[in-house]
Amino acid sequence: MRWSWIDIITQVQKGKRLTAIKNVSMAEDVLHDHFPTQTGPGGEALDALPVMPASLLIEGMAQTAGLLVGHAGDFREKVILGKIVKATFEREVTPGQTVRFEATLERMDPSGASTVGTITAIDHASGVEHHVGDVELIFSHIDRNMAGVEFPDENFVFTDNFRALLRSAGMI
Amino acid sequence: MDRDQIYAKVTEVLVDALGVDEDEVSPTATLTSDLGAESIDFLDIVFRLEKTFGIKIDQGELFPDNVAQNPDYVENGKVTKKGIAELKARLPHADFASLEADPSVENVGEVFTVDAVVKFVEKKLK
């Protein structure tokens, strides 16, 4: 199973903004456990409640924003997530919805970058878009920050997973 | 902007970046041991200071990078006298009393007090 929490990049402005979407599917393993059928406190049967975990929504934003930061530096740097500055959620995301991650680059320098992002759920049943949450992140350019410590030469951050995505968006 | 105004804004930056309460921030509080800052937080703090005060801070200008890995500064896990002298020259805003008392490389973070950050911003704004 590939660790890809975004399906396609829909918009990119190098060094400024990147938008990606993810379709949430009942076929995803994680939704079977989050949350499964359970027995309630009174012994009653509770139906399964499949919702996308907030941690994976943060991961989707981290991938979106990470590609934005990487692309801004022409993928020379190994961009890794350093800090989740803020992550607030006001709504659940459920199967059948499409999640849109919009990341904006706030600041970037040789040490790393900071991004702000919005998560929106597109509900295809009703046609309504809902604001799901906001995530602010800080990324580190590890080779710059860890000069003297060895890292493999090839960029282990932007692997095949991401290369296919980037190629289809014309970013590499 | 006077010193009190700078101090107030620096406090706000530290409260937001480190998740501490306003009353935990005092001029002598160290960013690392007292306020719990880690290296990634230093980057967050630099970005916020740039944004708040409209200044540009170069890499290593406020917080020196790679001290521990630099053989010129560190020997056997301790910062050398030459290392301390060099750091003092590069970071005139920092407070070296604690590091001079115990020059273990783990203590380098102790030079960064809230006051050191305020002094740095003051100088940048002049």
Image (cartoon, helix red, strand yellow):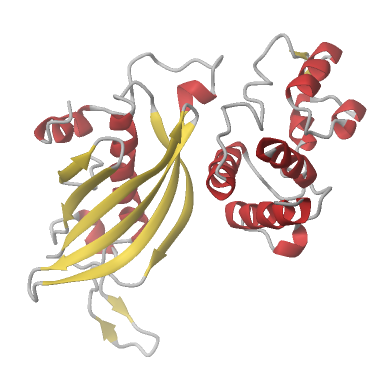
Q: Position of residue A3 (x, y in %)?
A: 26, 41
Is any part of residue B67 visible from this angle? Answer: yes
Q: In which image quadrant can residue B74 be found?
A: top right
Q: Position of residue B90 (x, y in %)?
A: 73, 22
Q: Which residue lies at the image location 75% right of the left edge and 52% below the top edge?
A: B2
Quarter of the C terminus of chain B within the rendering: top right
Residue ranking furthest to the right = B101
Is any part of residue B33 visible from this angle? Answer: no
Figure check: A76 above or below B98: above
* Of the pair A37 and B96, the residue shown nearer to us: B96
Q: Which residue lies at the image location 59% right of the left edge and 52% below the top edge?
A: B17
Figure check: A4 above or below A123: above
Q: In which image quadrant can residue B117 be found?
A: top right
Q: Position of residue A14 (x, y in %)?
A: 25, 35
Q: Position of residue B57 (x, y in %)?
A: 58, 33
Left or right: A45, with A126 as reference point: right
Left or right: A49, with B113 as reference point: left
Q: Which residue lies at the image location 63% right of the left edge and 41% below the top edge?
A: B38
Q: Which residue lies at the image location 40% right of the left edge and 15% below the top edge?
A: A152
Number of labels in the image equals 0
* Of the pair B69 and B25, the residue shown nearer to us: B25
* Of the pair A122 and B62, the residue shown nearer to us: B62
Left or right: B76, with A86 as reference point: right
Residue ranking furthest to the bottom = A42
